[in-house]
Amino acid sequence: MDEAIEMAKDGMDKALDRLRKSLTKVRAGRANPAMLDDVRVDSYGVSMPLNQVATVSVGDARLLVVKPYDRNTIPAIEKAINAANLGINPQSDGIVIRLAIPPLTEERRRGLVKQVKEFSEEAKVAIRQGRREGNELLKELEKDREISEDQLKKALEKVQEVHDNFIKQVDVVTAKKEAEIMEV
């Protein structure tokens, strides 16, 4: 019985972690190295993540600085950043690449909030799926006479309680990110 609740909790926890990771990639008008996590650079005939060919640091609130380990990879890094379609124009001086984060327009902010809500809904669906799987396992245990009807009822209530807690966490994380995006 506890195993079913833990399984449901684990699935819900993974959904919340995925949401948090997705939200770090949403640009809120501030420089954040996580924005470049999905950028892959073709270097020496191999496609590699940007953080394996360069260091990414925050210069100031609206500036990312990419310092390649090998200067010969600068054109490939610039090409990869442009191909990633982040809305950022790389500027190179031959040693480092500077990425100035442009301020967000009101329309772009609304679009980003909509994207955040989509991520939030995906997380909620995954959390509901975790609840469903936990409930099915508990009902299976009751059907096999491993737990009583009363134990089933208590366990289903516990799974629902865990589900509600995770949904609240998703709402809090989402509201925080929306406020960050809408902040001018």
Image (tube, rainbow, N blue to C red):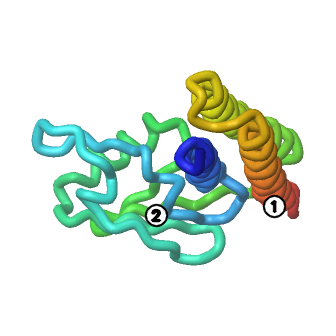
Q: Circle 1 sits on which residue?
A: 176
Residue 169: image quadrant is: bottom right
Tag 1 secondary structure: helix
- Identity, as a three-letter code, of the amino acid under mark 1: Lys
148 left or right, relative to 176: left
Expressed as whole percent of the image width and height from the top left, the position of residue 3 reads: 53, 47
Expressed as whole percent of the image width and height from the top left, the position of residue 5 reads: 62, 46
- Identity, as a three-letter code, of the amino acid under mark 2: Arg
Q: Circle 2 sits on which residue?
A: 98
Residue 98 against residue 26 in the figure, above or below = below
Q: Is residue 25 visible?
A: no
The front one of 84 and 129 is: 129
Residue 159: image quadrant is: top right
Number of other residues with Cα within 10 Å of mark 1, as a class: few under 14, some 14 to 19, many 20 or more? few
The front one of 73 and 3 is: 3
Tag 2 secondary structure: strand
Number of other residues with Cα within 10 Å of mark 2, as a class: few under 14, some 14 to 19, many 20 or more? many
Q: Is residue 114 visible?
A: yes
Residue at figure coordinates x 44%, y 68% from the top left: 65
Expressed as whole percent of the image width and height from the top left, the position of residue 149 reads: 75, 34
Residue at figure coordinates x 76%, y 39% from the top left: 156
Residue 95: image quadrant is: bottom left
Residue at figure coordinates x 63%, y 33% from the top left: 138
Which of the two discs, 2 and 1, labels the residue nearer the N terminus? 2
Expressed as whole percent of the image width and height from the top left, the position of residue 144 reads: 56, 24
